[in-house]
Every structure is written in C-alpha cells, then in structure tokens.
Image (cartoon, grey):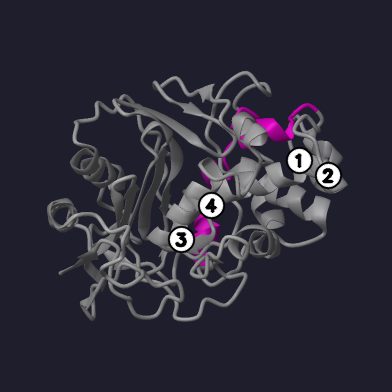
Amino acid sequence: MLIGVGVGVGFCKPANAPPLAGNADAMNQETVSGLQEVLKNAVRSQGIPGAAMYVETPQGKWIGAAGVRNLLWKQPMQAGDRFRIGSITKTFVAALVLQLYEEKRLDLDDPISKWLPADIAAIVPNSEEITIQQLLNHTSGLPDYIDSDDFYPDYEAEPEHQWTAEEVITYIYALEPLSEPGEEFYYANTNYIVLELILQAVTGKSLAAQLRQRIFEPLGLNDTFTEEKEPIPGGFVSGYDDWDGDGKRDDVTKLEKWGLGDGGIISTAQDLATFARALFAEAKVIKTKTLAQMLDFFPDDEGGGYGLGVTLTETDWGEAWGHTGKTGGFLSTMIYIPAQNATVVVLSNAADKGDPDAIAYEALELVLGEVSDRKHIYRPKKIRVYS
C-alpha cells in the first residue's frame, strides 16, 4: 500500500498532519510519482512492514508512506504516523546542551564530575578528566552500557520496567574504559545517559520537560514526545524485530520501550524534517556560531565524522549532516545537505531488516538529478534500545 503526496492530504491521528494537496510548495507530479515508487519498491524489496518519508529541496516538498503500520491488522501506513527514532534523539539532546552553553549555564570544557551526583562521579571512570564536549562527540572513552553482560538479561527480564539514567549508568561500573578521554572515537550510548544526568543537574528539570519546553513546543513539533515520560495521544506505529532469536519477526512495541537521552524520542518524518531545518538552516535552535561548534567533526576512522550529536557523510552533493537511529522495532535516518538545502527523513518499523539510508539517497538522486557516491554513512552497530 502507498500513500504519498507532495505535500499531501491530511493523515488521521497525528496532530501535525501534512497540509492539503495542491500546496504551492508541492513537487511536480512526475517527481511525486517517482518518490512514491521509490518508497513502495523499497518497502517491498527490503522486506519491511512499512515506512514514511519526507523530502524537501528548493524544488518543493513531498511526504508519503508505504506498507502497513501493523502486521496483524494490516492497517495502511500513514505519512503522518509516529515512530521511535532511536539515536536521532542524541541530536536533540546535544542541542539542549548547546542551548545551556549559550546561556553560560555550563561550559563544554567542564569536567563531568562537576555536574554528576558525587556517588556516580566517584565510580564513573575518568570523571574528573572527561569533558561535556567529549561526551557529545563520543571521545570520552566510556564503555557502552549495552556491552555489559548483565544489561540485556536484566532488560529482557523486566520489559515493563521504566528505566532511569541513574539505573542504566551502573552497568558500566564493571567495564574498562575504551580509551583515554579525548584520544579516540568510540560510539557509546553511555555518553548520552551521562548527558541526561548533567542536564537534570544543571536545570533541575527532567530531560523530557526540557525537550518539550525548549524544542518541541517552540518549533511546533506537535507529534514529538519522549516515550514513557509523557502521554502520547494516539500512540505510534507497531515496531518489529526478532525478540527471542527464533528467526521470526515479533511485535516488540511493548517489549522494547525506552525513554532516555540516548534514544527515547517518538516523532514523525515531518516533525524531524522541521527540526533538522530549524537546527541546521534557520538558526532557530542554536546560534550560527554555536552550530559551527556542533559541526566540528571528529574523524571516525571510517571516512566520516561525528560532531556534537551530529554525523557527517560525504556525498557528491556535498556534506550531509544528521543522524541515524536503530532501536526497538525501528530504523530511521535524518539527513540535511546544506549545499543543496535538501532535507530527507525516512522512518521504518522493523529493526531486523531494512536500510533507510538507501531509501533516502535514492530519493535524493531522483530529486537532485545525479547519483551520489556515498563515501560513508555512520550507523551504530547495535540493534536494540539505543540507537
């Protein structure tokens, strides 16, 4: 099934539904038809239940959906449906940190021991040397909590448990640091768990409250929420993965819940595109000078780079900024290419199969009219929970 327009008809429950067809910003019919085919064919060939995609360039906007939002009931996916976005959450968290930096409430060179509770700072390795900036760009050397032998057994034993950052951080206590602070890039979700603790200490408010007050509401992201931390009227689509390792796809929507700073946001393709443009192109989230610091990329030894909550990919169209996500039952990608003023977001509801990046770049090739030689796309290797 395919639903797509440029920009199209209103789509059911989400509050921030796409505008009516005939919008002056809509792409021409040939491009619309081509994008519909790209998405429909990708859902079929990649073997995923469904996906939603948003594309915006100077030529216009398009939003669409293909496949189904639930395999049991075969409900058609809608372009305005909500998904878990996994580690794209990290870009939101980084933006919050940088807002507080602009307000001089913290400094990027602050040691994390300055802000962590004393009992946690005493156990986190190198807490007096690791800086906030090193957390943001994954050069802290902290190990990833999901690499603990105990984390997944504990997580799977209590699928209904609402985890806190204070609980999760304990899983690194028995692990060795991956490097000295600032020396190497190691992607670790622990960094953004620590950042959540720091944000709470600086503001006295929960991460969910800060996201809503500082980003969701000011940008009008009416279909964006922090999972488990606030009500989500109308819910979100079902997500699928092989939960028990038997080779069969399971509905993990209620099994792999997560509401923390490394991957806890629920959103739509259109809301993520709005956020990406507000952050990277419109200076509505942080100042241009601060954005330059966010885009100071540390090489990741795979041909790309990682800034402050932002990935770097080199393409034939120029640099691509954004982030990917891989979490309980979902895959996602958010891309902004400044040289083309182009934005694309792809969200899918399966974590065991699929490649949102491939869908996004095929869509961009159609719209921008040339083939991109993607030298690198950074996607964290782990599947569950974090990213």
Residue at image mark 3: 271
Q: Earlier in the sequence, mark 3 or mark 1?
A: 1
Cα–Cα span, label 3 and label 1: 25 Å
| Residue at 52% in and 76% down | 232
The stretch in magenta equals 129-157
Looking at numbered disc 3 in the image, what kind of residue is underneath it? Asp
Q: Earlier in the sequence, mark 4 or mark 2?
A: 4
Cα–Cα span, label 4 and label 2: 22 Å
Residue 61 image offset from top left, x and y in percent: 31, 55
In this rendering, the label closer to the viewer, 4 or 3: 3
* Residue 154 forms part of the magenta stretch: yes
Residue at image mark 1: 101
In the figure, is residue 303 to the left or right of 2? right
* Residue 26 forms part of the magenta stretch: no
Looking at numbered disc 1 in the image, what kind of residue is underneath it? Tyr
Cα–Cα span, label 4 and label 3: 13 Å
Vertical comparison of 27 with 321: above or below = below
Vertical comparison of 14 with 354: above or below = below
In the drawing, what numbered circle is on residue 89? 4
| Residue at 63% in and 46% down | 95
Whether tag 2 and tag 1 are in contact, CB under 8 A, the answer is yes
